[in-house]
Image (cartoon, rainbow, N blue to C red):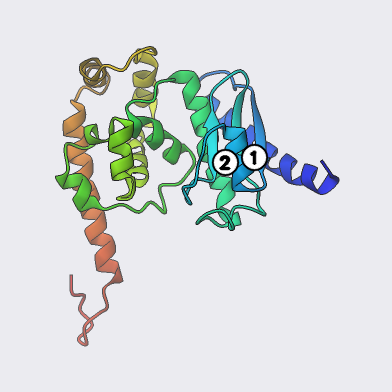
Amino acid sequence: MDNSEKIILNKFLKIANLEVKKFADFFKVPPPFFKLKLARNRDEFNRLAKIETSEPWLAGMFLAGKPAKIILLHPVAVEKEGIHFKEDLEKILKHEVAHLVFNEVYPLSQPAWLKEGVSVYLAGQTKRANFNLKFFSENGTFPLSLTTEEEWKRARKFGAYGISGKFIKFLVKRDEGEKLRFFIQKLPKENYNKEQFLQIFKEVFKTPLVLIAQDFLKNLRKEVRKNECRTKARNPSGIRLC
């Protein structure tokens, strides 16, 4: 590795190490050890990940193990191999670091909305979150409709990442994340059981998940209407149309 490559790798390592410490503090766990790999093209990314990937949105990946690994498309490759810009890499790295730390607390893949929502929230990706609110209001019971990998894949194009991150932010805002941390720590770490998951949630938050989610969607509709109102032009009399 030449000096210029070391500089690039060290830049991302510095970001990753800072985020690992911050997220570990949030979950109150020791910072996990990991290795960071930069892939100069999609073929190298696939070789490091040991799976075939072609999705244009996929520019980073967390792999559990000893040691854990984070794979990130190199700045020279990210715009050639997908839909992201070089400027997006820091957020993408933070998202994968969040997965790394979250895996220390809750290593299961289900429910997908919790795993991905926490990573979106911690990585600071909720501000630019795009989602189809109508889809999530009318297709199943949010967020239970985003539990399995199949459900997640189906909803991904409608903004599953964004709305799940927003929901986690909504939960955190209630008490600065104390109940969320306690809830995640109480969850069984071996097998996902929907009834048990919902029961623990109700015990910790004192309200059923579905009711809190309904309140969240209600607030989100208000937020969306408010944003739409801001973008509408004024009529000739100067009075807002909404």
In the rendered image, residue 152, in percent from the top left (x then y), is placed at 32, 38
Q: Which residue corresponds to mark 1?
A: 15
Left or right position of 223 against 51: left
Q: Amino acid at mark 1?
A: Ile
Q: Could you say which is closer to the camera, residue 226 or residue 147?
A: 147
Q: Secondary structure at mark 1?
A: helix
Q: Which mark is residue 144?
A: none
Looking at the rendered image, the quarter that the C terminus falls into is bottom left
* Residue at the (66%, 36%) spot, across then down: 37
Eyeballing the image, is 202 above or below 222? above
Q: Quadrant of residue 65?
A: top right
Determine contact: label 2, label 1, CB under 8 Å: yes
Residue at 26%, 21% (x, y): give it. Answer: 201
**Screen quadrant of the N terminus:** top right
Q: Measured along the vertical axis of the image, is residue 122 above or below residue 83? A: above
Seen as rendered, the residue at the extreme bottom is 236
Circle number at residue 93 = 2
Task: Rate crowding at label 2 as few (under 14), some (14 to 19) or many (20 or more) other CA atoms within 10 Å.
Answer: many
Q: Quadrant of residue 6?
A: top right
State which tag comes first along the sequence, 2 or 1: 1
Residue at 40 percent of width and 21 percent of height: 108
